[in-house]
Image (spheres, rainbow, N blue to C red):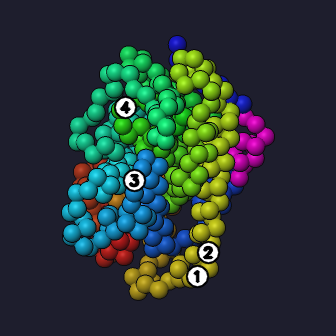
Amino acid sequence: MSWAPKYTITKGILTDLTKIEAVKNSFNDRPLSPVLLSSLHKTAKISQTHYSTQIEGNRLTLKQVENALYSANKTAKNYQGHDEKEVKAYYDAINYMEKYLDSDSAFSLDFVQKIHSLVEGSKKNIPYRDVQNAIYDSSDGSLVYLPPEAKDVPTMMQELVAWVQDNIDKLPTPIIAGLFHYQFVTIHPHFDGNGRTARLITSFIMRKFGYGLKGIYSLEEYYAKNLPDYYQALMTHPHHNYYFGRNEADLTSWLEYFIKGVAEAFTNVEVKAEKEQNKGLTADKSPLLRKLDIKQRKILELFTEFEAITSAQAGDYLNLSSQSARLLLNKWVDEGFLQIVNTAKKNRTYGLSEDFEQMLGN
């Protein structure tokens, strides 16, 4: 039997979905400079890494996470403490996810397993747990949750991924992402890394299917700022055993919590982007930028998300035919704005020239 989650789209969920849609549409039409987008994207990745690992007990502060990832101090970069390793592994997983998004590859079980292995700092896929595990309250040692038996995990994971694939064109993306998040941590397929993987795949689903906001928001901060609410929302049934209630639980309360968080994160991005614009950060201060025409400035936005682009991507973004886009990209190569990354005729890709890569901090 395939997974069939039970939930109701309440008035509150509808209201928040409307807010999410309004911000998404407004943001996509907002003219932000490539330099500002690159800065906001970097900040969001650091925030995502910090808060997702903090939820699981990582002790590094937000500034310490930034230093561990970006500091020029070699001592900090080479330090092999557990917390530093954990944030670097999570950051690597985010980077892999973004490259996977660039490749426009399909959502799959293999991808989910790859993300989990990266989150855990492993080069090889980590198999599902093969014995029963349990979640205990760290304060008093009492049993909080008993997940499904190990023998049921592979089938349940296949059903979960199949449900996403079958419903992504039928339901709003935030609903799909929220239900995936819930079911993944409910299955608890691995001994460790379940929460971090669930949150990262949730982000992937949002970005893959049109709700990325150019990768400059973080849902993890919403969860981390009030952990009791996060855990309470996931506890959809009072019985600790999966087979005695949670397998048939009504997930409406979780969805209300999750969708509210997405709406809050989206609103925060809109406010922050407007604030940064008002500070003048989108002003044309760079001599390099002043040399670019409108189309070139717009295509820079793509490079805040992708390291390399195809003529088809450029055509879609600039509302040009593939042939016109290809001619334009080749012209920009001759002018020194772009360089050809992959020279294969059928799979040709283009990247920024070195000067513009440095400007974006790539």
- Magenta stretch: give its range: 9-19
Dot placed on the residue nearer the N-terminal end, 4 or 2: 4
Looking at marks 4 and 1 on the same chain, the residue that comes earlier in the sequence is marked by 4
Q: Is residue 75 visible?
A: yes
Q: Residue furthest top?
A: 1
Disc 4 crowd rating (10 Å Cα; few below 14, some 14-19, many 20+) is: some
Mark 2 sits on what residue?
Answer: 275
**Residue indicated by mark 4:** 190
Q: Residue furthest front?
A: 140
- Which callout, 1 or 3, points at the residue further toward the start of the chain? 3
Q: Earlier in the sequence, mark 2 or mark 3?
A: 3
Q: Which residue is mark 1?
A: 279
Eye-nearest disc, 4 or 2:
4
Q: Nearer the viewer, mark 4 or mark 1?
A: 4
Q: Are marks 2 and 1 in contact (CB under 8 Å)?
A: yes
Q: State how far apart marks 4 and 2 are (Cα).
A: 42 Å
Residue identifier under label 3: 58
**Image quadrant occupied by the C terminus:** bottom left
Q: CA distance from mark 4 to mark 1?
A: 46 Å
Q: Is residue 321 above or below residue 34?
A: above
Q: Of helix, strand and loop, which one carries label 2?
A: helix
User: Residue 287: where, in percent of width, then height?
Assistant: 41, 86
